[in-house]
Image (tube, grey):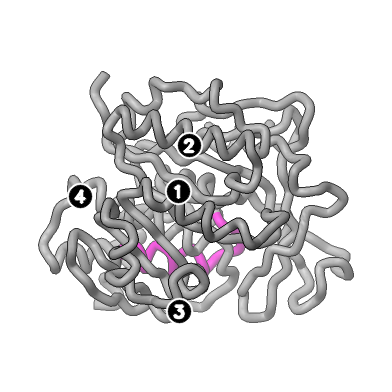
Amino acid sequence: MTKTTGVICIGEILIDLLSNEPDVNWKKVKSWTPYTGGAPANVAFALASLGLNVAFAGRIGADSVGFQLHHELKEAGVDTQGIQIDSSAPTRQVFVERNRSGERFFAGFGKYHSTAFADTKFDASEIPAELFSSYNCLLMGTLLLPYSQSKAAIYRAVELAKQAHVLLAIDINWRPVFWNNEEEAPLEIKSLMKEMDLIKLSEEEATWLFNTLDPKIISAEFPKARVILVSKGEKGCNYFVNAVSGTCPAFKVNVIDTTGAGDSFMAGFLHQYLKANMTGTNTEIHRWVQFACATGALCTAVPGAISAKTTVEMVEEFLTSFS
């Protein structure tokens, strides 16, 4: 089977319950709005909107929430053959606080413990190996590493990707609320990072794990990685791509909600990087990062992670308006 330019996004898909009451502790919030979320799923939706072939692999519950999410992926044109259905565990829902500036803060899981959800039962034996013959990139996060069964599934996917010579990409997406023992997280995350060809960290994650925002310094610990991106929100992005270092400023927009902005950024970069067959001049590399920053900025102008439905034409028009 011939590989297509496209991405398998693996990990969690869930519902973010976004507070309708800014600057109020989640235990006192009375009104919530549900939005489809989960970082790998957000990237999948964004890639589909950008016109790239994309699949999603993960585990959801056999409940109304799970069926809704499955339907949304299919409606968006995402390949769903990698989705597993769990009849005994619910689909994950996460309560998300926000402030008046649009920043969001993951607060908890309501009446459930973090280990109770279907995504923690992600089964390595049910991952379809044929996916890795069809796509040329595998993208993951780290939220399923705290759970033994889903961690095994992530590493099984990594092994299948390596066997099929598929590019390995990770967006760290650190969320303390998912970990029972936060002290274990850095070692687990860095161990997975060592397998990666492409690494994206937020400013907070880079500081936490490496005490630097310089991706070239970070790259010394991960010689396999061809790409390291440190996204800094409204301060732009530092990058080290194919041995080229640079900084790209952010675009000023009227921010409504930052949920999923980093995921949209990741989708924008992957779209450009894969379309260019992972090679480019210094100017072209800078343009890839600009495209990613613009895709992330457009996401913040609407509520929810997948509402923007950003197309390549939208990004190009946005970039033109700043040129």
- For marks 2 and 3, give the one nearer the viewer: 2
Q: CA distance from mark 1 to mark 4?
A: 22 Å
- For marks 4 and 3, give the one nearer the viewer: 4
Q: Amino acid at mark 2?
A: Tyr
Q: Residues within 10 Å of mark 3 (few under 14, many from 20)?
A: some
Residue at which label 2 appears: 155
Q: Is residue 234 left or right of residue 66?
A: left
Tell me which segment is drawn in magenta: 291-305
Report x, y in % for residue 286.
22, 68
> Residue 75: in sight, yes or no?
no
Q: CA distance from mark 2 to mark 3?
A: 33 Å
Q: Residues within 10 Å of mark 2 (few under 14, many from 20)?
A: some
Q: Is residue 191 left or right of residue 223?
A: right
Disc assigned to residue 278: 4
Q: CA distance from mark 2 to mark 4?
A: 24 Å
Residue at image coords 30%, 64%: 219
Q: Amino acid at mark 3?
A: Glu
